[in-house]
Image: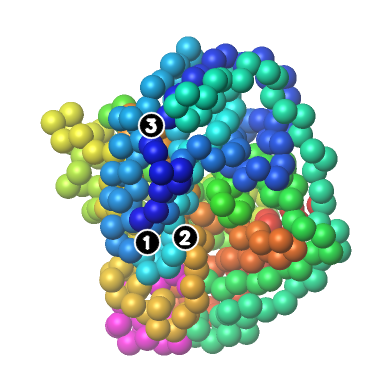
Amino acid sequence: MTLAPPTTALRVRTRPLQLDGPLLDVLPGGAGELSWVREGDGLVGWGCAARFTGSGRSRFADADTWWRAVVAGSAVTDDVRLPGTGAVAFGSFTFDPGSPGSALVVPRVVVGRRGDRAWVTEIVPPGTEFDDAPLPAPSPVRPGGRLRYSDNEVSATRYRGVVAEAVERMQAGELDKVVLAHDLLAHADTPLDARFLLRGLSTRYPTCWSFAVDGLVGATPELLLRLHGRTLESRVLAGTMWPATTGDDVGGALIASAKDRREHAYAVDSLAASLRPLVAELQVPEAPQVLTLPNVSHLASDVRARLDPQRPVSLLTLLEAVHPTAAVGGTPTPDAMAMIAEIEGMDRGRYAGPVGWVDAEGGGEMGIALRCAELTGHTARLFAGGGIVADSDPDAEVCEAAAKMRAVRDALAG
């Protein structure tokens, strides 16, 4: 675990802000873009007032301990008092505990909006004065120019073979479901600007959560956990189709698909089983709905819970209990994770890990890092995959991953 700067004592001030344009338009560029935005509302930030990095199975607990210390040592003035005001940190965690890169970032500046109210939060070291000046003028957003694609750790061809092996082993009764993925590299003529990708994704997928933390940029349709007060919410997605496979009635085909309904049930049951010991009330829909996006449609279930007031838990400790769900790992989860490591063999980094933000009360919002790319200089590493069950078709799974990857490819191209 590392900490920077070495002190956690911070001064925090939130004040109302007149904000006329889109949230993403205030990002200045070149200062570590941070984002969690959906349908125009959410948070963006930049700069770094403090930072946690960690790895291993204790990464969520370590982050929670560090964040509690930061909050306890900070002096906060909050003139707005809405979810997302006061002290906040953006977080992104690795899929596998053995991968490095999990982080919480406390921004220097946060700008937020909820409905018709907007605000700015400044976070500074002790003895530093707050800045009453207007927000800095953003630098021009740079398109990436011409893009060239190449295979990376797991090509589409290799992915098909991995899926075929998984299907064969599931048909032999080894496990019920495994979620497999592959990656792709995009090479640009000029350094990639996270704001360009964010704007493209937000415009095309406004009902998804457009996120950016430490160069991981995406638009996820899946809300892992939202905690405000005692109310806990989650949107579980599993089971996917797109028009090329079904014609116009994608929703009807999804609802009628025994394979997709079974895959979805594994994901919902996994989340419910993880939450049940930690909550006082749990509401799980009897049947999923269809979530339709421009590239694909998913089966979706909105799960709700109420925390026990006698057993306070934070969002970060809840993440430790639920990640990975069957939606991104498989069923049974330990067997699925072992199979992923054995036959996929790819370091997913923070792909399919939790991403979002936390507040001073221990609440916040975390999605699953899907439909995303890791930006490094001129290069973007794209990820996509899907849930595999015993009757999955390897060729169809390759096409499904390509359909999911289209979200980032289209946004990169502009």
Q: Are marks 1 and 3 in contact (CB under 8 Å)?
A: no
Does any portion of residue 329 appear in the rendered image? Answer: no
Q: Are marks 2 and 3 in contact (CB under 8 Å)?
A: no
Query: In which quadrant of the rendered view does residue 395 lie?
Result: bottom right
Amino acid at circle 3:
Ala
Amino acid at circle 1:
Ser
> In the rendered picture of this protein, how many numbered marks are placed on residues?
3
Amino acid at circle 2:
Gly
Q: Which residue is mark 2?
A: 101
Q: Nearer the viewer, residue 85 or 121?
A: 121
How packed is label 1: few (under 14 Cα within 10 Å), some, or many (20 or more)?
many
SS under mark 3: loop
In the image as oriented, which residue stretches furthest toward the left? 310
Which numbered disc, 2 or 3, marks the residue that appears first in the sequence? 3
Residue at (20, 34) in percent of width and height: 312
Residue 10 appears at what percent x and percent y? 42, 29
The part of the chain drawn in magenta is 165-180
Residue at (75, 56) in percent of width and height: 192
Q: Which mark is residue 55?
A: 1
Q: Which residue is mark 3?
A: 9
Residue at (57, 73) in percent of width and height: 182
8 to the left or right of 192: left
